[in-house]
Image (cartoon, rainbow, N blue to C red):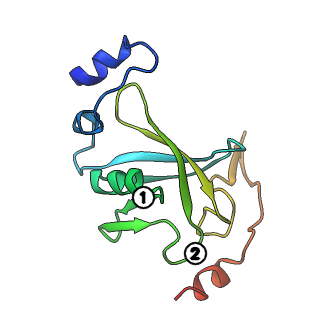
């Protein structure tokens, strides 16, 4: 753990540090990424998990529009650029180790590429998996209209 996060363990509420000092101490993985969990700010519903590199995190903090890093495309991915279903940042927080982000967002429409509000729609219940929600928008319609 970095000295910065060690110091923050005992810091009083409202202690402030320069953002660059904290971002320099973030524990990005070997690929330069950190997991980011997106949660709907008003309902608390967990919407999705994606990855951010430092550039995506800085863009998100500077613009208020959530930007991730697409591992499959190896480039920045501005949530909603192909579907129109954007995420607007309400707040961002790092966990105590500096290796996971929690983003409080205002999601417009579904967060999941399946057209569902949340990516977490496969419930694991005993010896079965159960689909727990229906799509809000047909995924074919969601992506075909933004081409």
Number of other residues with Cα within 10 Å of mark 2, as a class: few under 14, some 14 to 19, many 20 or more: some
Q: Nearer the viewer, mark 1 or mark 2?
A: 1
Residue 110: x %, y % from top left = 66, 65
Residue drawn 48% across and 60% down?
A: 65
- Is residue 52 visible in the rendered image? The answer is no
Classify mark 2: helix, strand or loop.
loop
Check whether the beta carbons of the residues at disc 1 and disc 2 lie within 8 A of each other: no
Number of other residues with Cα within 10 Å of mark 1, as a class: few under 14, some 14 to 19, many 20 or more: few
- Residue wearing tag 1: 63
Q: Quadrant of residue 139?
A: bottom right
Residue drawn 67% across and 84% down?
A: 141
Describe residue 24's horizontal placement relative to residue 114 as left or right. Answer: left
Q: How many marks?
A: 2
- Residue wearing tag 2: 84
- Is residue 139 visible in the rendered image? The answer is yes
Q: Quadrant of residue 143?
A: bottom right
Residue drawn 47% across and 58% down?
A: 66
Vertical placement of residue 147 versus 72, above or below: below
Classify mark 1: helix, strand or loop.
helix
Describe residue 138's horizontal placement relative to residue 32 as left or right. Answer: right
N-term mark: 1 or 2: 1
Describe residue 55's horizontal placement relative to residue 131 as left or right. Answer: left
Residue 132: x %, y % from top left = 76, 54
Residue 119: x %, y % from top left = 61, 57
Vertical placement of residue 44 versus 66, above or below: above
């Amino acid at each position: 753990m970095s000295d910065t996060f060690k110091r923050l363990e005992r810091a009083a509420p409202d202690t402030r540090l320069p953002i660059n000092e904290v971002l320099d101490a973030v524990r990005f993985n070997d690929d330069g990424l950190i997991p980011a969990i997106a949660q709907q700010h008003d309902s608390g519903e967990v919407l999705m998990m994606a990855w951010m590199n430092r550039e995506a995190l800085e863009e998100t903090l500077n613009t208020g529009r959530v930007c991730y890093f697409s591992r499959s495309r190896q480039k920045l991915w501005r949530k909603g650029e192909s579907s129109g279903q954007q995420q607007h940042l309400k707040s961002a927080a790092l966990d105590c180790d500096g290796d996971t982000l929690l983003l409080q967002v205002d999601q417009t429409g579904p967060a999941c590429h399946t057209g569902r509000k949340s990516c977490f729609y496969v419930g694991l219940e005993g010896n079965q998996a159960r689909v727990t929600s229906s799509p809000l928008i047909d995924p074919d319609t969601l992506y075909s209209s933004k081409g």
